[in-house]
Image: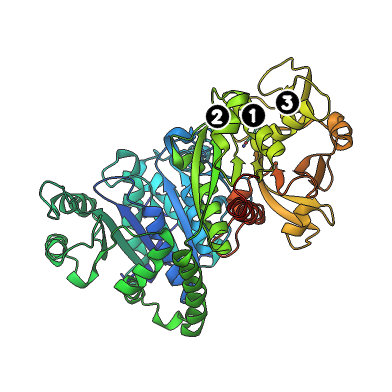
Amino acid sequence: MNSKNLLSSIANISDDTEFYTPMPGGYKPGKTKYVGVFGTVMSGLGKGIFASSLARVLKDKGLTVAPIKLEGYLNLDSGTLNPFRHGEVFVLDDGMECDMDLGTYERMLDQNMSRANFSTSGQIFTAVLEKERRGGYLGRDVQMIPHVTGEVKSKLRQLAVESDADVVFIEIGGTVGDVENAYYIEALRQLAFEEGPNSTCWVALTYILQPPALGEQKSKAAQLGIKQLLEAGVQPHIIACRGIKPVTKKAREKIAMYSSVPYERVFSMHDCESVYVIPEMVREAGLDSAVVDILNLAERLHPEAEKTARQTWDDYLSKFRHAKETVTVGIAGKYTSVRDSYASVIKALEHAGTNCGVRVEIDWIEASGMKADQAVDKLAHLHGLIVPGGFGSRGAEGKIACIHHARTSGLPYLGLCLGFQLAVIEYARNMAGLAGAGSTEFEDNSQHPVIDILPEQKQIEGLGGNMRLGGQDVVLTPGSLAAQLFNGAPEIRLRFRHRYEVDPRYIDQLVDAGMIFSGKAPDYPIMQVLELPVSTHPYFIATQAHSELTSRPLRPDPFFFGLIQAAVDVKSRQNKSPQTV
Ligand code: GLN
């Protein structure tokens, strides 16, 4: 039976067939192809970066792509995960709180993701159990195979239907051999069988060790990792070898031989200067052509579109490579020891820097325990300051001290979410005569709770998925700094993740004291952007949103772009008259 027949013969469920594969309505077999990326040897290989780069190159060729990240953990989303352990929680426009890899996809593809692009084991099992309670399995015992794997396949095909993509990119979290990912791998094995030849392309990402004491590349760990994939019934079509140096012919030959993958399809994907160089590396190695061949996609390509897309990327890369001048931006945070917890802020700074023609050096400022009088010294060498998002009271006073210094010394400042709220507190205390102003997030009986819980949050119990989340429209005041940054746009869209806001009862006092609220929610008194007049401070702006989440290499976030421009000005003024700034 060929694959088309196999697919059409699959009944949703019946007692006389074991081919249980729920098929979403509107699914067109053969329209969407699937690329799966599996990690072997260890986690942290940059699977998301690799998969998104490959997806980018295929998109440049004129194909439509839709990625999906399959996570093994049982949480329903990433909302309750600690950024110390898992990196930042990325928020999508539809409010989904997900893995930071989705940020990599959005940036690399310049394409918004939705909850259809992210799955966890928790979501899969919930769907299966809900169906079971509804009697959806017609008296059958519900099993990992075929029911749980069926749910996974259904999710992948659902994405194919919704996106109508030429290629769905599937990235499986963790490493082959993890118990929690085993059923995802089994689902992909089944998918390949059902969809038939030239429909799926499996890429094993592996790691070539190079112990300094030996000075030689060792491929055994990679071979054993790939063997685990073969044991699961998945024959990779392509192997991409990560390593600190270009992977030698000898190591690649051994891997080719051991895993039955032609040598020409074993590629070196070694470390490089920036993630934005990887698409170029993928193309130069010919990895993209291998995928096109395997999936029989040649007829769907648009070579003309590819030329323009490549030119745009090449321009970005050449700006990145030629930027020599540096500015130093401080990030005052709580999770400064784990950079992944600020991944998007770092990226947004890189985008803004590259587009301004400078390199941004980041100075991590541990705010916990910092005293007011220490801020002056600790921030003296900076050209700009960011207080990013965060939760809880630890480090709050130190961050307020940093903001106070930035406001009173003319140091360019950008506040993000918590950094917005703390700027309000600092201003309330020192400019609006509201001594003891604070946030009810930090203390219940602050004298002036200028930051208070959002009304809709008061009713909500528990911590999962209950904040004001996702994309929201923001109306900008014409003529304000914010409006200028966004080229005069009357309304913009930003991403949010917060429980607290400026208490509307204090807005008039803050405004009377000189604070400008230049961005507001359209039908609700939530303040979303604040700024100080440019006549009193070169750049003091903050947003209740996480504007770092929507920054893209080719479209840097305007708040960050403005910060870097202001930082460049500060630096050039310092260079002209070192004593006066
Ligand atoms: N803790 C603050 C709130 O919940 C800020 C949140 C954030 O910075 N993401 O509103």
Assign a secondary structure to mark 1: helix
Q: How many other residues sit within 10 Å of disc 3, few (<14), some (14-19) or many (≥20)?
A: few
Residue 7 location, x and y as percent?
A: 40, 65
Assign a secondary structure to mark 3: loop
| Residue holding disc 3 | 459
Q: Check whether the beta carbons of the residues at disc 1 and disc 3 lie within 8 A of each other.
A: no
Assign a secondary structure to mark 2: loop
Please report whichever mark, 2 or 1, sits nearer to the chain's N-terminal start.
2
Please tell me whether residue 145 is drawn above or below residue 25 in the rendered image.
above
| Residue holding disc 2 | 367
Q: How many other residues sit within 10 Å of disc 1, few (<14), some (14-19) or many (≥20)?
A: many
Residue 407 vs residue 509: left or right?
left
For badge 2, the amino acid type reads Ala
Q: Check whether the beta carbons of the residues at disc 2 and disc 1 lie within 8 A of each other.
A: yes
> Where, quadrant-wise, is the C terminus in this rendering?
top right
Task: Report the Cα–Cα distance between label 2 and label 1.
Answer: 9 Å
- Where's ligand 1: which quadrant? top right
For badge 1, the amino acid type reads Ala
* Front position among marks 2 and 3: 2
Residue 517 vs residue 382: left or right?
right
Q: Residue at x 44, y 58 (%)?
A: 11
Task: Report the Cα–Cα distance between label 2 and label 3.
Answer: 32 Å
Instruction: Tell me, yes or no, if residue 23 can be seen here.
Output: no
| Residue holding disc 1 | 401
Quadrant position of residue 572? bottom right
Q: Which of these two is toward me, 75 or 149? A: 75
Quadrant position of residue 554? bottom right
Q: Residue at x 74, y 33 (%)?
A: 424
